[in-house]
Image (cartoon, rainbow, N blue to C red):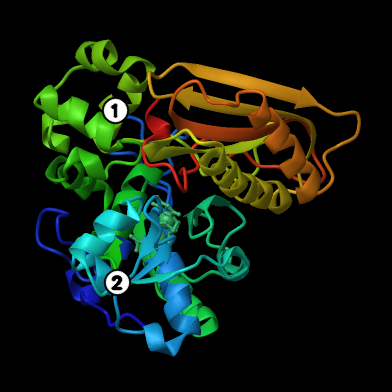
């Protein structure tokens, strides 16, 4: 639906060196050769083949697909009210600077013709199920990060297709064919770079980064594109004179640990194109939750009730997706002065349905009402989990509504 903006021929831009053809490129992502650089993975003799797939302007594209009147127009999914926030923006809207997590009022100022559409999670979930089913044809190692994206480890070529790039192409074609939507894909040797690569030629793009191109590719990018570096971390880095991957790679581990704590080691490796994290298909999790950081602090009971409802939707969707059963619900609230409080309730029986979960959520909110000051973050977590099937961890799951929640 979105016309390809970039030909696949330029998929290696930013990768450094002359872009080899895709076929040639893929021949050089070997399944098993001696590692040319320090350990790339716990198995030093294996270079993994990782694909990161991410749908283009996901919620907005689904709305444009389902309502032809919206096609080719600037569309925002989210509330148009004064305090609403844009969840997703169509690429037509992005041309005006409209983007996810922007207050709707700002978006309207930037793009007066912007069309606001209410979210329809059922439709997004349906597409999410479809794409996961497509992924599963090509690999059993799938780590979803959110409804619209996942890491796939295709080192073991389940269908014998012969190359990671061919697999990525087949997946993109199947998604287009079966959902009527476009996805972008990044192909590389680790998760960190594959995710950067999927973003490189969006929308409807493919980008391959070979092991020898990794460090140079990372060096060329602004740090704000790194997964986990939100606006606040990017600002902090800028204050420290770190703007690009190259700036980051110039810092040693001691400096990084001093400024970024336990995150320093990850940054040290990432800046060098190294990421050992495996695609985590089925780790057992102990809790499931979600939280939102707001642009405008919320204080009135009405605002807070609306806010908790949104979080109930977000978290209940995850609970259902993982078929999680738990007895304890924890609410977290952070005040405008950054003080964080939690309230929790444990029930005798597992929380069975959304209504029950919602009732507990609101009763926890009651405990902090009237709010003593504005609230900048709200979250709910279901813990004390008993698995009803394989529950997987989403420790590096992207916050969907928050934009800086992973920075803490
Ligand atoms: P993203 O994949 O981050 O964004 P996107 O699919 O809209 O656009 P892109 O082409 O750049 O990938 O998020 C997927 C969906 O998650 C998005 O369509 C709406 C939702 N979302 C929010 O609700 N709030 C947010 O802050 C973000 C970033 C996403
Ligand atoms: Mg997306
Ligand atoms: Mg995404």
Q: In x, y percent, where is residue 239?
A: 12, 24
Q: Ligand 1 quadrant?
A: bottom left
Residue farthest bottom in this picture: 68
Q: Residue 139, relative to residue 407: is it above or below?
A: below
How far apart in space, not on screen, are marks 2 and 1 (Cα)? 38 Å
Residue 313 percent coordinates (x, y): 63, 51
Name the residue: 47% across, 85% down: 67
Question: Does the rendering let one see residue 325?
Answer: yes
Quarter of the image holding residue 328? top right
Q: Which mark is residue 267?
A: 1
Residue 267 coordinates in the image, percent (x, y): 29, 28
Quadrant assignment for the N terminus: bottom left
Residue identifier under label 2: 114
Position of 206 with respect to 336 (left or right) is left
How many C-alpha atoms fall within 10 Å of the one at disc 2: few (<14), some, or many (≥20)? many
Which secondary structure lies at badge 1? helix
């Amino acid at each position: 639906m979105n016309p390809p903006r970039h030909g696949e021929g330029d998929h290696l831009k930013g990768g450094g060196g002359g872009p080899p053809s895709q076929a040639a490129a893929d021949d050089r992502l070997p399944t098993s050769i001696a590692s040319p650089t320090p350990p790339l993975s716990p198995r030093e003799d294996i270079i993994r083949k990782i694909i990161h797939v991410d749908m283009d302007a996901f919620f907005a594209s689904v709305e444009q697909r389902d309502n032809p009147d919206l096609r080719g127009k600037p569309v925002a999914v989210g509330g148009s009210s004064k305090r609403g926030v844009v969840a997703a923006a169509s690429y037509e809207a992005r041309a005006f600077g409209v983007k996810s997590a922007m207050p709707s009022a700002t978006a309207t100022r930037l793009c007066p013709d912007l069309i606001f559409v209410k979210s329809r999670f059922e439709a997004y979930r349906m597409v999410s199920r479809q794409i996961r089913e497509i992924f599963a044809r090509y690999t059993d190692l799938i780590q979803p990060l959110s409804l619209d994206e996942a890491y796939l480890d295709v080192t073991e070529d389940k269908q014998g297709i012969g190359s990671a790039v061919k697999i990525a192409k087949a997946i993109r074609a199947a998604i287009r064919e079966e959902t009527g939507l476009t996805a972008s894909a990044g192909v590389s040797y680790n998760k960190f770079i594959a995710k950067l690569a999927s973003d490189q030629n969006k929308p409807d793009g493919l980008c391959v980064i070979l092991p020898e191109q990794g460090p140079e590719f990372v060096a060329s990018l602004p740090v704000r594109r790194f997964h986990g570096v939100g606006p606040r971390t990017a600002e902090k880095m800028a204050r420290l004179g770190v703007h690009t991957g190259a700036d980051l790679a110039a810092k040693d581990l001691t400096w990084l640990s001093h400024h970024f704590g336990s995150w320093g080691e990850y940054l040290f490796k990432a800046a060098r194109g190294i990421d050992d994290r495996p695609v985590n298909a089925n780790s057992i999790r102990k809790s499931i939750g979600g939280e939102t950081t707001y642009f405008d602090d919320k204080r009135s009971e009405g605002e807070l009730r609306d806010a908790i409802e949104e979080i109930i939707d977000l978290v209940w969707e995850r609970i259902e997706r993982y078929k999680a059963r738990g007895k304890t619900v924890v609410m977290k609230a952070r005040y405008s002065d950054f003080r964080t409080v939690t309230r929790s309730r444990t029930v005798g029986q597992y929380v069975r349905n959304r209504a029950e979960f919602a009732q507990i959520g609101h009763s926890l909110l009651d405990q902090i009402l009237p709010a003593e000051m504005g609230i900048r973050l709200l979250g709910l977590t279901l813990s004390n989990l008993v698995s009803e099937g394989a529950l997987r961890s989403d420790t590096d799951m992207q916050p969907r509504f928050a934009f800086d929640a992973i920075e803490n």
